[in-house]
Image: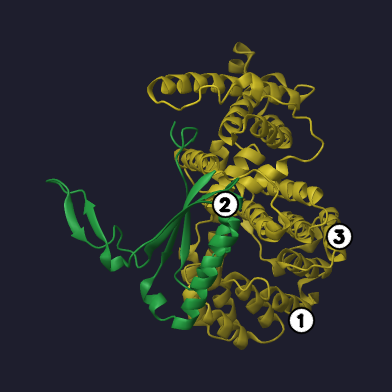
Chain colours: A green, B yellow
């Protein structure tokens, strides 16, 4: 099954992390991609900082363009990848090894990709 | 129903109400014994928990209606299996039509993906296949209330109405919760499987927690008396037994079963004429010696595996109470030591509150009150916190504050029997 995994974090908390520790985590994240290459269907992308976000949203008189991310939450999406694993347990096991989960504020959202055989409608 | 009505409609269930209740209890036990196995077998062969579970739930409703009239058939499992298969086949045919219709509109939908004739396989495996189902229902990707509702339905065979009553919810909300949980299992690829060794302990603890919640909910149904809904407690003990039998090398499974049996043994002393009686005031001659003996066997089984845990420690605390012939004879120091050990596994506010009670009993009510006051932020909305605080304040001679605390407790409890107990204390 294919899942999109979305990496979320709190930029304010990340800003307090010493640079060398951050560097170490980036190196281990790079290793994580290498070690799990067989299960990663698409490396996805790391996103520019949330300050660069622009959102186009619904408006009563037509869509409007606003500065900022879609959500008011402190946590922001920092990037995403696509994984291909047998089931949800395998997805959780893979995500649990993501090095940045050692930092407060970090989370990884797991969402199955809708396919023609999906049971989400009906 | 009056006698003449019954005579006029001989097909209807016309037994006296007590007999009907008795046979209903038997019916639900038969259903409980069979339905989880059938859901597991069907879910495995159909690769859809959703359809399997709906089909069995429908079969259970049919069985309860048919068996109430005609009695339980010689092989109720086969009866349920046949009815469930029939319902599943109906659902698959409907779904197949739906898929074919959809395939006409959307390219790429495979109309042969749910061929009912290929889907059946022989469900007569010797392994207890309810365990993978149970682990799937208690998957951490589901919210706890969804885990509970789905377990009650798919594993224990409760009807939506029974689950709604047991979990303070309405039927539509319960039905919705179950549908969402099943859809999430299907759509996100949550496997119905006993987890790997690395996750086993963590995942088993979720299962055991749900079983324990099931037992506790039986006692805290809002607006009901202490004797109501006894069979949910019975379901919980049954399920704890299923888990312990299937996983004999897991000490915590035996620990939970022991704990629930100890609690069950106190049942008739805990509730007298619908009123709650506190542990220290219970008539211990009313404790069920046979259940206590079973509990001890389970606790010893757990202890021999030499891997302590929070359920075993709670069972060991319950064993201390069972050992004491009178409340005064309780070895409170031993109880306190066990609570200290328990804190290493579970430092939740409720455990700390119970430890404070033991602290008071070994002669340190002031220290106990300090502990209890420290839990204010976490427990001030729980009636039990106010009730324990009231007791300690009274021990320390602070009667006015004690009365105020009792009144707070009274305001916060939704259970009739607890209300009467607290009302008696506050003189209301």
Asked which secondary structure carries label 3, the reply is helix
Per the model, the C-alpha gap separating discs 1 and 2 is 54 Å
Q: Seen from this angle, which residue lies furthest left?
A: A61
Residue B260 position in % (x across, y down): 73, 56
Asked which secondary structure carries label 2, the reply is helix
Q: Is residue B197 visible?
A: yes
Report the residue at 36% width, 76% height from top: A12
Above or below, B161 against B383 in this view is above
| Circle 3 crowding by C-alpha within 10 Å: few under 14, some 14–19, many from 20 | some
| Subunit of label 1 | B
> Where is mark 2, residue-wise?
A39
Residue B99 position in % (x across, y down): 47, 23
Q: Which tag is nearer the camera, tag 1 or tag 3?
A: 3
> Where is mark 1, residue-wise?
B333
Residue B49 position in % (x across, y down): 59, 36
Report the residue at 66% width, 82% height from top: B360
> Where is mark 3, residue-wise?
B301
Is B195 or B327 nearer to us in this picture?
Answer: B195
| Subunit of label 3 | B
């Amino acid at each position: 099954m294919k899942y999109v995994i979305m990496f979320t974090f709190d930029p304010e908390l990340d800003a307090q992390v010493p640079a060398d520790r951050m560097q170490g985590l980036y190196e281990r994240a790079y290793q994580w991609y290498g070690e799990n290459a067989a299960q990663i269907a698409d490396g996805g992308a790391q996103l520019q900082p949330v300050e660069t976000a622009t959102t186009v949203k619904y408006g009563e008189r037509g869509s409007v363009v606003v500065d900022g991310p879609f959500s008011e939450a402190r946590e922001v999406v920092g990037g995403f990848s696509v994984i291909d694993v047998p089931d949800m347990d395998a997805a959780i096991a893979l995500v649990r090894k993501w090095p940045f989960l050692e930092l407060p504020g970090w989370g990884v959202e797991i969402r199955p990709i809708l396919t023609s055989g999906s049971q989400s409608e009906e | 129903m009056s006698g003449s009505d019954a005579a006029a409609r001989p097909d209807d269930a016309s037994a006296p109400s007590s007999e009907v209740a008795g046979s209903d209890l038997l019916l639900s036990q038969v259903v409980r014994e069979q339905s989880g196995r059938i859901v597991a077998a069907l879910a495995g062969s159909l690769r859809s928990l959703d359809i399997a579970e709906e089909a069995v739930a429908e079969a259970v409703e049919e069985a309860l209606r048919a068996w109430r009239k005609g009695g339980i058939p010689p092989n109720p499992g086969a009866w349920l299996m046949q009815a469930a298969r029939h319902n599943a086949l109906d659902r698959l045919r409907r779904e197949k039509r739906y898929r074919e219709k959809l395939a006409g509109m959307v390219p790429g939908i495979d109309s042969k993906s749910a061929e009912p004739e290929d889907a059946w396989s022989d469900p007569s495996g010797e392994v207890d296949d309810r365990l993978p189902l149970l682990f799937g229902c208690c998957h951490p990707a589901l919210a706890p209330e969804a885990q509970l509702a789905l377990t009650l339905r798919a594993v224990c065979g409760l009807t939506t109405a029974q689950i709604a009553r047991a979990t303070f919810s309405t039927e539509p909300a319960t039905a919705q919760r179950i549908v969402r949980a099943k859809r999430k299992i299907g759509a996100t690829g949550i496997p119905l499987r006993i987890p790997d060794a690395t996750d086993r302990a963590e995942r088993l603890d979720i299962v055991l927690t749900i079983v324990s919640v099931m037992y506790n909910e039986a006692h805290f149904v809002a607006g009901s008396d202490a004797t109501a809904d006894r069979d949910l407690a019975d379901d919980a003990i049954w399920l704890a037994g299923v888990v312990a039998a299937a996983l004999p090398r897991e000490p915590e499974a035996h620990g939970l079963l022991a704990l629930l049996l100890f609690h069950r043994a106190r049942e008739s002393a805990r509730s007298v004429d619908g009123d709650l009686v506190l542990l220290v005031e219970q008539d211990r001659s009313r404790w069920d010696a046979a259940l206590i003996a079973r509990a001890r066997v389970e606790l010893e089984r757990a202890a021999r595996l030499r891997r302590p845990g929070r359920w075993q420690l709670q069972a060991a605390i319950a064993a201390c109470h069972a050992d004491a012939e009178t409340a005064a004879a309780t070895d409170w120091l031993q109880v306190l030591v066990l609570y200290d050990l328990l804190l290493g596994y579970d430092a939740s506010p409720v455990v700390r509150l119970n430890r404070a009670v033991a602290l008071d009993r070994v002669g340190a009510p002031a220290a106990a009150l300090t502990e209890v006051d420290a839990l204010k932020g976490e427990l001030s909305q729980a009636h039990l916190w106010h009730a324990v605080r009231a007791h300690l304040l009274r021990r320390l001679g602070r009667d006015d504050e004690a009365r105020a605390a009792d009144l707070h407790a009274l305001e916060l409890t939704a259970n009739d029997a607890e209300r009467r107990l607290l009302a008696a204390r506050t003189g209301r």
